[in-house]
Image (cartoon, rainbow, N blue to C red):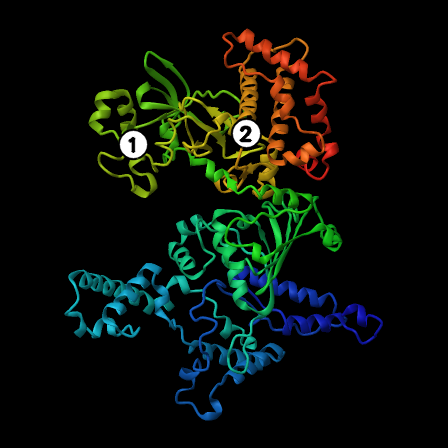
Amino acid sequence: MYGFTQDKHTFSHAEVKREIIQENIFGVDIEQGAVDIARLRFWLALVVDEETPQPLPNLDYKIVCGDSLLNRTSLDSPIMNVFTEYNRNKKDEDKITLNKYQALIHDYLNTSNHTVKDRYKTLISEIKSYFKTELEDKMRFYTRDEKKLIEKYFMYLNLSSNMKTLFDDKKDENNLSPKAQKDLNKIRKVIESKNQYANTVKYDKLYKNAFEWRYEFPSLLDDNGDFKGFDLVIGNPPYLRIQGIREVNPDFADELVERYKSATGSFDLYVTFVERGLQIVNCSGIVNYIMPIKWTNSAFGKGLRELVSNKTSQIINFGAYQVFNASTYTALQWFTPNSKELAYYELDRNLTTNEELGAYLNSLNDESKAIIKSDKLDKETWVLTVGDSVSILNNLDLHKRRISDIFDRIFCGLQTSKDDVYFLYECNEKDGMVYGYSKYLERNICIERGLVKPLLKGEDVHRYEHLSTDRFVVFPYKIENGKANLYSEKELSEFFPNGYAYLKECEEILRGREKGRFNIDGEWFQFGRKQGILSAEFEKLVAPDISMGGNFTYDSKGVFYQTTTVYGYLKKPEIKEGYKFWMALFNSRLFWWYLKNTGTVLANGFFRFKPDYVKPFPVPEIIPPYTEHLISTLCDYILFIKGQNTNLSDLVSNKLIFEYFERIIDGCIYEIYFGDHMKELNINIIDSAIGLIKPIEGLLSNEEKRKKILDTFISIKKTDNEIRNRLDLLTIKSPKVLKVIIED
């Protein structure tokens, strides 16, 4: 508009701004301070362009305070009767209609006469005080299970859905079975309780700041009183996990779960704002937020993904790059009621100023985006990436088997609810006793070895390294017939007197965990949760929850338990490939590349290895036994080298040797997935490696193993060795596939 009129002397920045502010912009925030600041910024935006001071516009009914997630009456419920109570016993000329109310708000916003303004405001407040605050449908206070019970009642008695009949019409109940009678009595008690709640909701703290969109913004209603919706909704919604909300305001948390389809799992509050935004835009409107993108691939995002699979039109993902000096990883995201495809962009540099951001946004073009058809999106995890990565992911996705088909359990570690009591540090063993430091008592204690288990934390687990720890966990359970049974206090005192004395010393704090949930005689010393108790004492892989690259290693004897910062992996019995092969796959560059392109980045480029991110990784249906044996042998080489205190050679470090063997493993993994591609380019290595890399399992002495590994390394490093030469050609000959993976 400015470009069209800038040569014309009649153009006024201030007038245009004033009209936009008064006629086009609305705002809602639950904090009055935010509302005041927004109004002030609008006024300042006008003042800087005024040649002579002008009266400031009224923003009282434009930028307002309220809880935009809660409203007593739905947007589509009838509104024509909302003035009935106000109009009662009034003369015709004093009665208010929808059109009169809309005109009254408009006149208030456009008058600069303070006397008239005060009169209008008083009348508006009087009218609004008569608006109905009761909910139109009290059924919304019932949980899904309770609604099913009520439907069952109507089925029993063949009644219409009239709440009155639940209490007044009992004549048809005589022929019901005792079970049906019991159900009906249960239903009546539920309804009595919920009716009391519904009748007092307008006074309830939960609805104190509920925002009634139609009453507060009447200019958005058509002549029939129907809500037309906004053309554009923009915002930066709050990022709050439901666990934190539930601790402070459990009623509000329950209301969100009941009201919003997007409120699934351990959801973040911003997902409900997306749903609310789509409810208040018109059929061609746009919702544009800056918010985290974690919902696209996290478990809690399933509800929102299902809701917006055909409503997400564009995402610009900032990833790990910082924009606006934000502390969280965010994205610009656009939603529209009907979207046939999603345009996805990824930022590739830091942006520190608005000018840099503007230049970047203006530089976006078709070549820098990926297009995902809406019919390819659903409630399952969304894989979003750009460039050559798209075709690589598509090729991987051709393998229909997944990690979830390989592993029976991917489990989190022990959750005690009081680690300072149960975890012992800097421990050593002597004569059947463990001596270690208790953080809770702030001193060393002595406890029976039979009552503790070796404990791993994330910092103890590193790729291809033998496991060791100086931590133990007090473990008051006995494993019997596949079940974890809590010791009785009598058993503890008899078998583990030192351990029992220690627990008794901590009894008060253990009983008080989680607001007294464990104040149970004979059970006060149990763990907070039973997760990880039964899965640890098996052969397994372990890996830290948060990591830079794969840090998987092998617990061959099932000795170690772990904290919540470590995951354990138990494969299904029918899976033929051994744990060493799967350890190599998880530690490979290919798997790390996949996680970086499908997972969620954390600070400093770390990623979470959550089961939801790991399980979708594709796995070929057939892995030749000779390939699996080759990779497992290379794992033996690396595990052995990392267990040595001295170098295998005076000329080269152990680190250089085992890193080179990791390169060979990576080459083998690439060939498992891109075999035809590598053979076509003459860069396949498995056939050559099988003839050269021999197992060390049968060798008796460490010296023999050292010699075998070093000789193999020296042979491969010769200039005419085919493995060496082909490894060096991977990025050169395969710039669109292997180079993308290796150099990411």
In the rendered image of this protein, does residue 452 appear above or below residue 405?
above
The image quadrant of residue 372 is bottom right
In the rendering, which numbered label is found on residue 484?
A: 1
Q: Residue at x 82, y 70 (%)?
A: 6
Say left or right for 165 vs 19. Answer: left
Which residue is labeled 2 in the image? Answer: 624
- The kind of secondary structure element at disc 2 is loop
Q: Position of residue 165 (x, y in %)?
A: 24, 74
Between label 1 and label 2, give the one nearer the viewer.
Answer: 2
Q: Position of residue 88 (x, y in %)?
A: 40, 87
Mark 1 vs 2, N-terminal side: 1
**Which is more toward the observer, 508 or 582?**
582
Q: Position of residue 636 (x, y in %)?
A: 53, 19
Identify residue type, mark 1.
Ala
In the rendering, which numbered label is found on residue 340?
A: none
In the rendered image of this protein, does residue 610 appear above or below residue 206?
above
